[in-house]
């Protein structure tokens, strides 16, 4: 335990929560498939970043997480890699089912970035990824979603539009990520986030990332996460 505390300190990580899993030191420690390890290596990722060292084992253990770390710390892979493992463990989607993983991001640029990063890890595992944000034809979007996908990366407003159009449904969704939650709040997406979370089964796994934790986000986190582990890297929020 002393060693774990020292290691966390060396990563500038602070955690709070009950029975927090120990951080990993290498991607091999995660028990990833050879295929996923290969695509990680292909990205040039040699070792996990501090937030990945601590967040990956927490998410693999099935716990909800609140992650705070500055931009550029590698938060995307910290939620995308466990999302892929989570999906590989689930029964295949049937027609009119899906998605399993839902990622909400504040802007189309961010949603697109996450989409690109996710696609890189889904080249050889058959996982279908759709990006859902404004500026694209709603009809094309509708058709793509209707064809089915395991992962949706979305801005909250457009996702709500697509849910209303019944382009997709949340019956199989079990993994929800709220990325850059503070920016989503600043952009006025709180009602949409609540609506999306309210449509996904409550025993889902929920991951919330934010650079800052103002009181209104604390309140949301208390309402839509279950017994989350908090991970803070460096000096943020
Ligand atoms: P954040 O969401 O925390 O701002 P990103 O997930 O966008 O950060 O990652 C920032 C950059 O670091 C990206 O270019 C990403 O590909 C790269 N990156 C992520 N994880 C690693 C890693 N383990 N090793 C090397 N580069 C990484
Ligand atoms: Mg990010």
Image: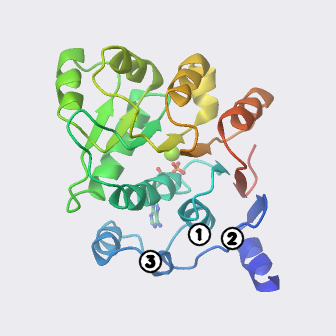
In which quadrant is the N terminus drawn?
A: bottom right
In the image, 124: left or right of 215?
left
Q: Nearer the viewer, residue 146 or 216?
A: 146
Counting residues from the start of the chain, the first of labels 3 and 2 encountered is 2
**Is residue 188 shown to the viewer in this render?**
no
Q: Residues within 10 Å of mark 3 (few under 14, many from 20)?
A: few
- Occupied quadrant, residue 181: top right
Q: Position of residue 66 (x, y in %)?
A: 67, 48
Relative to the observer, which residue lies in front, 17 or 183? 17
Q: Which residue is mark 2?
A: 11
Which residue lies at the image location 61% right of the left edge and 43% below the top edge?
A: 208
> Label 3: which residue?
31
Which image quadrant for residue 226? top right
Quick check: marks 3 and 2 in contact, CB under 8 Å?
A: no
Q: Quadrant of the C terminus?
A: top right
Q: Are marks 2 and 1 in contact (CB under 8 Å)?
A: yes
């Amino acid at each position: 335990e002393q060693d774990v505390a020292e290691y966390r300190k060396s990563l500038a990580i602070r955690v709070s929560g009950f029975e927090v899993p120990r951080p990993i030191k290498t991607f091999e420690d995660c028990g990833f498939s050879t295929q996923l390890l290969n695509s990680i290596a292909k990205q040039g990722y040699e070792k996990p970043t501090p937030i990945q060292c601590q967040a990956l084992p927490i998410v693999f253990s099935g716990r909800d997480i609140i992650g705070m770390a500055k931009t550029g710390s590698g938060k995307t892979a910290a939620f995308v890699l466990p999302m892929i493992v989570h999906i590989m463990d689930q029964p295949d989607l049937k027609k009119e089912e899906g998605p399993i993983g839902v990622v909400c991001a504040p802007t189309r640029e961010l949603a697109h970035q996450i989409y690109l990063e996710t696609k890189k890890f889904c080249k050889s595992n058959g996982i279908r990824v759709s990006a859902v944000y404004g500026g694209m034809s709603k009809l094309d979007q509708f058709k793509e979603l209707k064809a089915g996908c395991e992962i949706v990366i979305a801005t909250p407003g457009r996702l709500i539009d697509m849910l209303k159009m019944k382009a997709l449904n949340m019956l199989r969704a079990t993994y929800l990520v709220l990325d850059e939650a503070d920016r989503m709040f600043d952009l006025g997406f709180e009602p949409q986030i609540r609506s999306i979370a309210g449509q996904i089964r409550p025993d889902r796994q929920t991951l919330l990332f934010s650079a800052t934790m103002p009181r209104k986000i604390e309140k949301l986190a208390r309402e839509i996460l279950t017994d989350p582990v908090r991970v803070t890297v460096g000096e943020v929020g």
